[in-house]
Image (cartoon, rainbow, N blue to C red):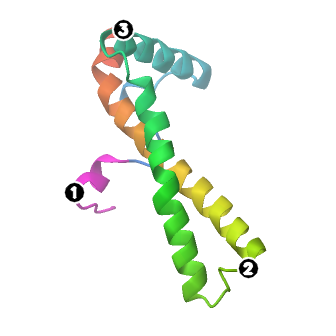
Amino acid sequence: MHRHIGIIGKLKWDIRPEELEGFPRRQRQWLVHWAFEMFRKEHRFAEWIVCGLCFLGLIPGYWVAITMSNWLGFDVTDVVVSMICSLGGGLAGAGVGGWLGRQWLLQRIRPYLRRIT
């Protein structure tokens, strides 16, 4: 049994909502898309939440990568090390931000999923 603290308890690595457990994969994708479209009609800028969190994830991802490489003893003033850190850290931060945005969005569209299933 896993124990989670705070908001982490609501997040899952598997982003499949419980409302769609009995459906095949293709049908689940279609239902999530339809529920998102219903949600987007009422909330105009909902699709920008995921993009915004991806963008906001770039900065902490870059900062963590530079800090870790400096802590591990790499020369961050070297151009190649700096490019690798900024690219890798930015991509990792954007990925985490996008994942969190998708988690938030799936929580918000659950009432719509219940309505259409």
Q: Which mark is residue 47?
A: none
Circle 2 SS class: loop
Decide: few, some or many residues near mark 2? Use Cα within 10 Å; few <14, some 14-19, many ≥20: few
Left of 87 or right of it: where is 55? Answer: left
Q: Which mark is residue 78?
A: 2
Q: Residue at the location (38% across, 31% down)?
A: 106
Q: Quadrant of the N terminus?
A: bottom left
81 to 22, vertically: above or below: below
Q: Label 1 amino acid?
A: Gly
Q: How many marks?
A: 3
Decide: few, some or many residues near mark 1? Use Cα within 10 Å; few <14, some 14-19, many ≥20: few
Between label 1 and label 3, give the one nearer the viewer.
3
61 to 21, vertically: above or below: below
Task: Say which residue label 3 marks.
Answer: 41
Left of 117 or right of it: where is 61? Answer: right
Q: x, y percentage for residue 7?
A: 26, 52
Magenta span contains residue 14: no
Q: Could you tell me how far apart the alpha carbons at marks 1 and 3 are, in whole angstroms?
A: 31 Å
Q: Which mark is residue 6?
A: 1
- Which segment did they paint magenta? 1-11
Q: Nearer the viewer, residue 111 or 84?
A: 84
Left of 10 or right of it: where is 27? Answer: right
Circle 3 SS class: helix
Q: Could you tell me how far apart the alpha carbons at marks 3 and 2 are, in whole angstroms?
A: 49 Å
Quarter of the image where one finds residue 29: top right
